[in-house]
Amino acid sequence: MITQRQSDSISSASISQNQKNTVEKVVVEPAATMNGIAEEQHYRSSVYKVLAGLLRTAPDNDALEQVSAFASIEQEGDELALAMSMLGLSAKASDADAVDDEFHALFIGLGRGELMPYASWYLTGFLMERPLSVLRDELVALGFERSENVHEPEDHIAALCEVMAMMIDEGFAIHQQENFFTAHMSNWLDHFFKDLSQAEAAVFYRSVGRFGQAFSTFEKQYLTMLV
């Protein structure tokens, strides 16, 4: 988990604790309470938190129930909305014990899981390489640091999603968000989420991969358009 110095942390280490509010904001909160850019930032931040939670740890039954709320989203032919709806339907049909087994097979395994959710791995084929060093320098410059009780490298996909959520919530300029996304995420996210959507051990997480890939495409277009 990544935190911002001298600021409240955003915790996605256990989505069973925090996913409910995030999902309710994405699906239930009336759009009338927000408008324009503020509404867009709200939804972007919430999606990053959902992805961070699902990729940090396996969801329990309560969290799956909350994610199942996505099934009610109108699809309207849009890939992001369709992927979100499919994620909700998948969550509705899933059991926490089975998803936990799936999560361990995908990301932990005996020695290692089927997938390695780290930027360094996708960019160099090895862990703890230069992409992580560059990322750490930028996190320091932005005022972020890894929580003391977290041992995962900062280039874990969940940690990067947490950083983007915090940048949005803290009001970082769009060009700063775009710079961070381009430098540390856009050059491997599509590959990772495609692998996740096609992973042999994936069932529920196939829908997470599809949703992540659709959101990554949206972010590239959105950030480029506003910069």
Image (tube, helix red, strand yellow):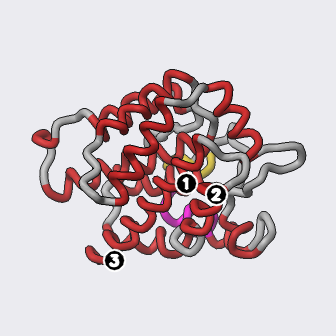
Between the residue at mark 1 and the residue at mark 2, the CA separation in whole angstroms equals 8 Å
In the image, 224: left or right of 163? left
Of mark 2 and mark 3, the one earlier in the sequence is 2
| Residue 41 x %, y % | 28, 54
| Residue 152 x %, y % | 71, 49
Of mark 1 and mark 3, the one earlier in the sequence is 1
Q: Which mark is residue 159?
A: none
Taking the magenta stretch, the answer to whether it contains residue 218 is no
Q: Label 2 crowding class (10 Å Cα cut-off): few <14, some 14-19, many 20+? A: some
In the image, 167: left or right of 200? left
- Residue displayed at 61% across by 26% down: 96
Q: Which mark is residue 224?
A: 3
> In this picture, is 157 found above or below 14?
below
Camera-side residue of 8 and 82: 82
Q: Which mark is residue 198?
A: 2
Circle 1 or circle 3, nearest the eye: 1
Circle 1 or circle 2, nearest the eye: 2
Callout 3 amino acid:
Thr
Region rendered in magenta: 135-144
- Residue displayed at 27% across by 76% down: 225
> In this picture, is 213 found above or below 151?
below
Q: Label 1 belongs to which residue?
A: 209
Between the residue at mark 2 and the residue at mark 3, the CA separation in whole angstroms equals 28 Å
Q: Label 3 crowding class (10 Å Cα cut-off): few <14, some 14-19, many 20+? A: few
- Residue displayed at 44% across by 74% down: 179
- Residue displayed at 30% across by 49% down: 43
Q: Main secondary structure of the magenta part?
A: helix
Callout 1 amino acid:
Gly
Circle 2 or circle 3, nearest the eye: 2
**Residue contact between numbered discs 1 and 2, judged by CB atoms under 8 Å:** yes
